[in-house]
Amino acid sequence: MSDVDQSRIRNFCIVAHIDHGKSTLADRIIEKTGLLTSREMQAQVLDNMELERERGITIKAQTVRIIYTAKDGKEYILNLIDTPGHVDFNYEVSRSLAACEGAILVVDASQGIEAQTLANVYMALEHDLEVFPVINKIDLPSAHPDEVKEEIEDVIGLEAQDAPLVSAKNGIGIDEVLEAIVEKVPAPSGDPDAPLQALIFDSVYDSYKGVIVFCRLKEGRIRKGTRVRMMATGAEAEVVEVGYFGPGQFIPCEELSAGLVGYFTASIKNVKDTRVGDTVTDAANPCAEPLPGYKKVQSMVYCGIYPADAADYTDLRDALEKLQLNDASLKYEPETSIALGFGFRCGFLGLLHLDVIQERLEREYDLDLVTTAPGVIYKVYKTNGEVIELTNPSNLPDPSEIEHMEEPIVNAEIMVSTEYIGPIMQLCQERRGKYLSTEYIETTRALLKYELPLNEIIYDFFDALKSRSRGYASFDYELKGYEPSKLVKLDILINHEQVDALSFIVHADGAYERGRKMCEKLVNEIPRHLFEIPIQASVGGKIIARTTVRAMRKDVLAKCYGGDISRKKKLLEKQKEGKKRMRQVGSVEIPQSAFMSVLKLDNDD
Amino acid sequence: MIDTDLMLYVHIPFCVRKCAYCDFLSAPAGDAVREQYVEELCREIADYKGKAGHRPVSSVFFGGGTPSLLTGEQMSRILDTIRNCFTLTEDAEISMEMNPGTVTMENLVQYKAAGVGRISIGLQSMQEEELSLLGRIHDAHTFLECYEMARKAGFSNINVDLMMGLPGQKREALADTLKKVTDLSPEHISLYSLILEEHTPLYETYADSDKLLSQEEDRALYHMAVAMLEEKGYHQYEISNFAKEGFFCRHNEGYWRRRPYLSFGIGAASFFEEVRWNNTSSLSDYLAGDHAPADQEILTLKDAMEEFMFLGLRTTAGICRETFEEAFEEDYETVYGEVTRKLIAQGLLQEREEGGKHFVSCTGEGLDLNNLVGGAFLLEDGE
């Protein structure tokens, strides 16, 4: 195969706010180009993780090559690089964007621009992509495409008058989108004979082939036998196979050259060696510079994950190991809790990432887990000059050794109907937000900008936002940096014994409120015992809130005759089984649900 | 196991209308279906002829549903069949349940003539608003008439069923019901703390209601009732059962002492030679002649010992250690010594010696927390 004609290549991605129809449009494009019949397309081809389909979001980037014969009669190679659709995966999104020359912006014809729409467009523009809008869901009765077009022009400044009007769901307007891709997305450039320079934008682990590295060739070429080097990690390996992406399958080929998107395998054992954003080059003839933009992925959110049954510890470890093969951003290390026994402190990109991992552990590995409240990484400056990155509240040094502490702050953008500005501002206020600005997108919608401490938004901020705006608010954020803050450790004592797994770091001003809520929540979670159980919240040894679980007074079935005996036995066995699954702290048995319930302390309570 | 008498239970799954709290196997049905059912019952009873060996039958209990929906003739046909197929002891206790809203003098006389000696009247409450909350078909006055008729018909062993712990129930209301009922001086009173069963109208209405009594409120009512009944000469012999001296219900006691029983009719549960089983709960299958035992459970020694404890500890007399050792040929101390001492230390159990035998029984608190006590006697597998 001679060099592919670069003028016939289009590398593009689709960006959108969640639920605006990104994945559906991707499916229609693939279907339209005849690769699969609609019957074969089991719903959304690109979202192929079960969980992704359920939640309607894309977690891992998916990629597919499509051959399209345009109206000019020529055949084009269209590489669609689908991007993860959540703020947790912003870095992955940025690397996927860097692999493209253009982006389709999907905007819902009824909802118009949302917070993520803006965030994604700005990111695409930062990467110098040619962005063109597509108005989706035009067949809905509530669609108002003309207004949405104006909004796009006014707010983003993109030409939108000739934006294709489509219904991805019903396959309307897909031809126009394909033509627009050919017309508007620039062809790639790059010299196939220059030293190899390829961008890794994803990788997956395959138990037979090892790591399959997804990359975009910027310069040079790669083929079987090429000895490649990952420039950031320094890992080297000999390429075993190169190829491109068919829908749901890998199709091997002879060679990939500058401008193309594809994959290679090289018997690499671990995705840690092939980090997203790293540059692949030819070890024998390396390029001078790596591609810009590589970052080592940072965990933003930490929590403890413990097996519900201590006997499952090794199963949990094996499961985490396997998940990490495919997900270099998942971090874990063993830790021990007095209340929960042996488990792991795990680091995640964000709360969704945490959720996804937890669900996969439970579903795919059939594990029953206890998760502690998620927290962020605090920087603890000690009086002796040492700086600790604190991921587990239990490890907080004695207050006398702490000079000061810092917490991560994010820049947040919230898009909201003007009628809900009040409640949303109040929410941000309660979450220690620092108001920056309000921009009116149109008469009925505004964009609020705030600085918010990350630890205030990882618990239930999304839920609170939705409930206070009746669903009419959308939200996006990015890390700004660390700032000094007055933080304290809130401890929970059950029957006068401190439960390490329930401790967490909180701003001093919110400690009382939070402690009170925890106590109120726990009092309903801990079953009555034979004796009264005080539940106390304390900061620095001082009790700031207290509730009491009253002693059990009644646990009896009034009737037990002939037909009730087997049933009674089952009830007793169930109670006994339930007790076994509880965690013993001192003389108190605490159900797993107690550890989970304190994660969600709704402010409206 | 020691050779003992046999008990029989006959299930009558019909009622006039389902009550708001009821999750039993019962439903309204027409005359024709009732007659068909009685016919099938007789056939099922006849199936057992000769199968229970030489065991004499000391108790027969008609439960429901509403057994008083049967005519006197139907009742006598069933009892005749039983006499044909089993040997009843001379003093056999023959009980039937009765809804005051269904009773006629004519039927009462016929039941008596058929051999019924003990009747159990489902009153539940003397408060009209409570009766309507429970969805009962009768009022307090109907009960009084029924009670009077029963006495006139010659019944000298009457139980009255009551309920307590109803949503929003006031102390005065329960005290008033208890006073009115004890004034009539029935031989036996059952008092059940309401169990809110899922899938019942009462559950739908009150499951999340703040009218539901707290544990403390429920027990305050219960303790008051126990004291009132004891004062009027009703001795508490089990969690929910009270009787004048000599009128403890033999049939009920049999369940808690693990006496064998055969049961007839749909959904009926039997226990015989350390096997428990149920009849089909489908009326149409039953009427089509399906008498096959279902959900058969063969009890191991472990199961039997556990049952002995958690059933026996429902009674105020409690369990006898010597009886345990005789029945299972196991050392009580080895099997349950430790847990017994632990529960005594917690104030849930007590011990006493009587006629050279050693008894373990619940304290008042132990009765309130009877599931906790019973659960403590479940053994680990392989123990």
Image (cartoon, rainbow, N blue to C red):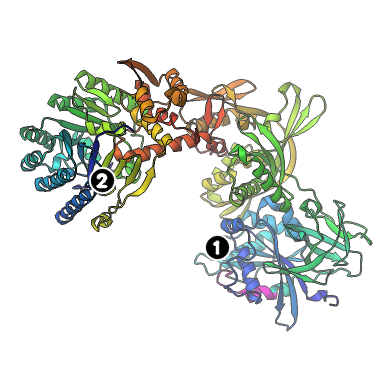
Residue type at numbered disc 2: Lys
Q: Position of residue A191 (x, y in %)?
A: 89, 69
What span is in magenta? A167-179
**A279, B326: nearer the viewer:** B326
Left or right placement of residue B83 versus residue A160 in this view:
left
Between B81 and A211, the residue placed more toward the observer is: B81
Q: Secondary structure at mark 2?
A: loop
In the rendered image, residues at marks 2 and 1 fall on the same chain? no
Tell me where residue A200 appears, x and y as whole percent: 79, 58
| Chain containing mark 1 | A
Where is residue A15 drawn, in percent x and y?
67, 61
Residue A573 figure quarter: top left
Residue, x 66% and y 76% (percent of image)?
A33
Label 1 residue SS: loop
Q: Note whether A343 is above or below B335 in the view shown.
A: below
- Tell me: residue B176, above or below residue B205: above
Q: Is residue A432 visible?
A: yes
Amino acid type, label 1: Ser
In which quarter of the view is residue A35 placed? bottom right
- A584 and B64: which one is in front? B64
Residue closer to the observer: A474 or A602: A602
How many numbered circles does the render carry?
Answer: 2
- Residue that mark 2 sits on: B51
Task: In the rendered structure, find residue A393 and report the number of the disc placed on it.
Answer: none
Image quadrant for the N terminus of chain A?
bottom right
Q: Residue at x 23, y 20 (%)?
A: B230
From this view, report whether residue A442 is shown above or below residue A582.
below
Closer to the camera: disc 2 or disc 1? 2
User: What is the chain identity of the residue bearing mark 2?
Assistant: B
Q: Is residue B47 left or right of residue A198?
A: left
To which residue does mark 1 refer?
A110
List the single residue furthest toward the front: B54
